[in-house]
Image (cartoon, rainbow, N blue to C red):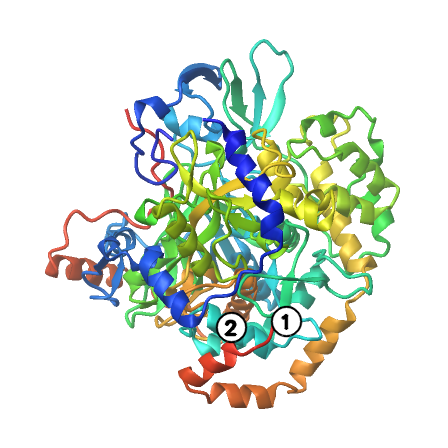
Amino acid sequence: MTGSFDTGKAVSQEDALRPPLVTVEIAGKSFRVPAGITLMKALWYTGHEVTRGAGCLGGFCGACATYYRTKDDPKVKTCLACSHAVEDGMSFSFAPVFPARKATYDLNQLENPKQDLFKLYPETPLCRNCNACTEACPQQIDVREGVWKAVFGDFKAVSETFMDCVMCGLCVPVCIADIAPNLVGVYASRAYGVREMEKPPGLFDRIEAIAEGQYKDDWDRILKMTDEELQQASATIKS
Amino acid sequence: MDVQALHDVVHNSRDVRRQQTLPKLSQAERDTLIKKFHPDHREAAYRPVAFGPNEGDLTVRELASVLEGDSVVSEDLPLTPDHEVDVLVVGGGGAGCAAALHAHGQGAKVLLATKLRLADSNSVMAQGGMQIAVAPDDSPVQHFLDTLKGGHMKNDHLLLKTMVEEGPSIAKWLLELGVLFDRDPDGNLHVKKGGGSTRARLLTCSDYTGLEIMRVLKDEVLNQKIQLLEFVAAVELVSDEQGACTGAVLQDLDNKRFLVVAAKTVILATGGIGRLHIQGFPTSNHYGATGDGLALAYRIGAPLVQIDTFQYHPSGGVYPEQLVGQLVTEGIRSEGGHLVNAKGERFVNELDTRDVVSASIIRECEEGRGVRMPTGRVGVWLDTPLLEVEHGEGTLDKHFPAMVRQYARYGVDIRKDPVLIYPTLHYQNGGVKIDVNGETSVKNLFVAGETSGGLHGRNRLMGNSLLDLMVFGKRSGLTVAARAQTIPQGRLTLNHLQRFRAEAKKHRVTNQVTSPVVLPAYTEQP
């Protein structure tokens, strides 16, 4: 927009198209930045070096978890800095890395994944229904509901609830029971995949067919072809 | 400017467009279109590399500078190891995790270093899916031929055969780790059709395929307690007297200290190059996609292949401004979404290969049929509401929750209005030349994933990258684990760096940039 961060070069923009500047507070300090840029771009625009707190820049990795507050609103909200636009009077800070405890496990060795949840993450059933995790989620996941589904052993529902989870961890520091809901979500979701999902028969048939050399003749034929013949062969496959 | 009036062109032309079928272009028509409009064919953007293994080869200016760049490491750096391992994996995306898990699984001592956090990568953003020939009407051979056609017949046959044949076993591995691929009612893996493919072959986890895979792989790397260094970048490789790779010099980004790793083998899985903004294009890539592995491998003497070809994904965001360059999933076109110009017309078969679709979008815009937004940027429409019309209300929410959310954040409802797109720099088609086990021409130096080259030819097919990462991550991981049992740790020297610097001097290359770039220089300087 006005910086080098979209194309690697400064974009020269006609004055008429140049957005107005707005005032934002970054970690307690006031800056003027172009209206509408993302919080991440506001950091670069204002001269901040960013080594931590930036990842995919596309809203998927959760590296840029951020707390923000809009003008005159007492409510502190959360967002991903790469995917949220500045507005005038906004105040924001990166969320610090929170020292959550991840349990380690071998999903194939667990006796009963639904019961083992209470050994691996014993704090999970202590949820007091405060709903702070759900409110903290920048992905609008019903985190509290997901935690309870894990407690009740409905791991399929947990996997569906947490499919949008980018593991930003913003649900963790707000939990008064010290639950790390995102980690519980990964555990339950993986346990569902490993222990409850049926094996897809077609896949195993295909693996066997390959191992038995079912495609050997095709390969022999194809790998001997000239480029022209290959071009012909690939052009004539029917969709 | 009235954005709604621009939208109306799309809404008003929808019924007419729904009756149309657009023919696929003939091979000759495709070639002509690409030569005229694809960025790979802009001669002014290219120059020969001045020296090194690819001396004289044409590549984009941005990459040439990085390959000829100088190291931050001085030749007299004491090479006393801070870590001694069997395998150093550089990069924490899909290829790095797959390599580390497989090497560790075979008992190798693995160190994984990444300059961001584990799993912060392009892999995590992959929405479209992963091509694996599992459907009854499909086969690895079909997959091979489709990919070859997409790559303009320039793919390395052996690498490609290896990838398509190992695809099904990769699906099995991921299922065993708990990855939840979409299923059909009969329990089989659900497959979707991707651009340039003759069969439905994309395995998906709604439009979070990469995220789901990376959540699982990251969790497993942590479960396995694989030694991990985050916010630590590889800045130089080290070699023995014979020129084989014997480790690397890393730099901690927090305190700038160098860390020397003695490693019997090194796997570079550093991903792509989008953040070099080739030809000034915006990019869909992650923050660290600065081509580090290419620079490192080149300096130690590994030749690269097909470094003159890049993939510009047809659908990068144009409007709103916050989404410039960000990827809009190809899945929309897979499910029948139209591309529409300013006149309300379709102009390409939306399921053609990425290079053809991108070139046709650039053509529309350069010939005055693009849509200009109030921000000054130009693009064409992707008719997202069409999916609600064709497949019923709620389709977008159900199949594309990530994209609905991506736009809703900025007040755009893709269920009601189309989105504006333009090609974005997405993928490096070429890279370091490897064999079927991922080994480069430099002994004990391996490369996996986007950093490698040859497999995809001159254009990668949708869904083939996730598979590439897993197959060659796995193969390199297994190979280095076996290798580590048979070789001693080699001596650590920077002889290759001396040679490289002498070459630069001989070719009078001055004003070298520092490479690897590590992170893009976005911070505005006072």
Q: Residue furthest top?
A: A72
For the point 76% across and 42% down, the residue is: A161
Whether residue A75 is visible, yes or no, is: yes
Report helix, strand or loop for mark 1: loop
Give the side of residue A179 with respect to residue B274, left or right: right
The earlier-in-sequence mark between 1 and 2 is 1
Tell me the chain of label 1: B
Could you say where residue B95 lies in the image, as x and y percent from the top left?
52, 59
Residue B168 is situated, as x and y percent measured from the top left of the image, at 65, 71
Q: Quadrant of the N terminus of chain B?
A: top left
Comparing B200 with A130, the one in front is: B200
The residue lying toward the viewer, choosing from B145 and B388, is B388
User: In terms of image quadrants, where is residue A4?
Assistant: top left
Residue B522 in the image, given as x and y percentages of width and height: 36, 35
Secondary structure, mark 2, is helix
Q: Which residue is mark 2?
A: B479
Residue at horizontal 15 percent and vertical 60 percent from the top = B502
When the figure is inspected, residue B444 is found, relative to residue A135, above or below; the finding is: below
CA–CA distance in space, label 1 to label 2: 25 Å
Q: Residue at x 58, y 53 (%)?
A: B333
Q: Amino acid at mark 1?
A: Ala
Of B121 and B20, which appears nearest the observer?
B20
User: Left of B416 or right of it: where is A109?
Assistant: right
Q: Which residue is mark 1?
A: B133
Eyeballing the image, is B39 above or below B302? above
